[in-house]
Image (spheres, rainbow, N blue to C red):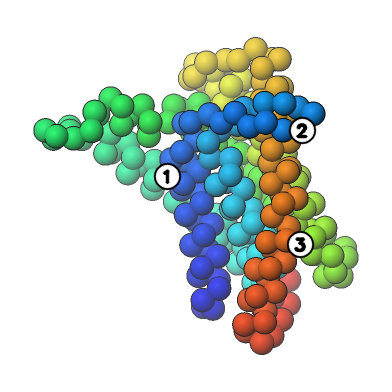
């Protein structure tokens, strides 16, 4: 296994786990035209997963990228199991406040459900879209497949997460708090605008990473398009 594949896979999983852990904090980010928008704390970390998966797709092909995405999906359950087990075990004297610990790390059921649904759909679509654009352009225009796949998959991620977490889960499963329609659409627009901006900004980084790996290996490592 090439070192670059190990590094990019580790980056993907690290960013994914980090996004889950820090999403309890809501960010207020100022954007041109839209003003201040609200987004989960894991937005930036989660964007790194799309950078890593696009690099893996370009360098090592569709099959490997999909394997990473789906194995990482299973790792979400490992993370949740470890977090909730730690919360459930009684705290020793001198520990941080267990209630504060549970508040910060214990994600509510609706957020977990929304996050898992959004992840499995958006990340798999990202790999599929990347390679469809790659085939349609005969391997040219890396920027197009990077931005195109990330922009569409981030839209899927944003819409699915917000609707499942704040509309479907409260209405169908009685988990979490339902938000007014106007607030739901405001969250979707704000989050997606921020994610789209990040997708455009990360394009030079994808070029740099892919170029570095190919120069370092002395070959076109990923002519694999399977």
Q: CA distance from mark 1 to mark 2?
A: 37 Å
- Secondary structure beneath dot 1 equals helix
Distance (Cα) linking label 3 and label 1:
28 Å
Label 3 – label 2 distance at C-alpha: 32 Å
| Residue 77 image label | 1
Query: Dot 3 corresponds to which residue?
Result: 131
Task: Give percent across and percent down for residue 166.
Answer: 58, 21
Q: Residue at x 54, y 57 (%)?
A: 12
Instruction: Please give the label number shown on residue 32.
Output: 2
Q: Position of residue 127 (x, y in %)?
A: 69, 57
The residue tagged with tag 3: helix, strand or loop? Answer: helix
Instruction: Tell me residue 138's x, y (percent).
Output: 87, 70
Please identify the quadrant where the C terminus is shown.
bottom right
Residue 9 appears left or right of 185: left
Q: Is residue 49 left or right of residue 195?
A: left
Estimate how packed mark 3 is, as few (under 14), some (14 to 19) or many (20 or more) residues with alpha carbons within 10 Å.
many
Specify the quadrant of the image occupied by residue 193: top right
- Residue at 32% x, 44% y is 82
């Amino acid at each position: 296994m090439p070192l670059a594949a190990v590094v990019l896979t580790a980056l993907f999983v690290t960013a994914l786990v980090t996004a889950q852990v820090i999403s309890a904090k809501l960010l207020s980010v100022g954007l041109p035209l839209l003003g201040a928008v609200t987004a989960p704390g894991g937005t930036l970390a989660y964007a790194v997963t799309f950078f890593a998966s696009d690099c893996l797709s370009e360098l090592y092909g569709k099959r490997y990228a999909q394997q990473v995405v789906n194995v990482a999906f299973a790792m979400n359950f490992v993370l949740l199991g470890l977090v909730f087990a730690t919360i459930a075990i009684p705290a020793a004297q001198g520990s941080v406040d267990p209630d504060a610990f549970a508040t910060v790390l214990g994600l509510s059921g609706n957020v977990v459900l929304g996050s898992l649904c959004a992840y499995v759909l958006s990340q798999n679509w990202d790999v599929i879209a990347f390679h469809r654009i790659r085939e349609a352009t005969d391997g040219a225009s890396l920027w197009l497949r990077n931005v195109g796949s990330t922009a569409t998959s981030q839209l899927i991620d944003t819409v699915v997460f917000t609707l499942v977490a704040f509309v479907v889960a409260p209405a169908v499963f009685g988990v979490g708090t339902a938000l007014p329609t106007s607030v739901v659409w405001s969250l979707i627009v704000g989050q997606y605008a921020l994610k789209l901006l990040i997708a455009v900004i990360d394009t030079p980084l994808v070029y740099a990473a892919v170029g570095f790996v190919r120069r370092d290996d002395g070959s076109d490592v990923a002519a694999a398009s399977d």
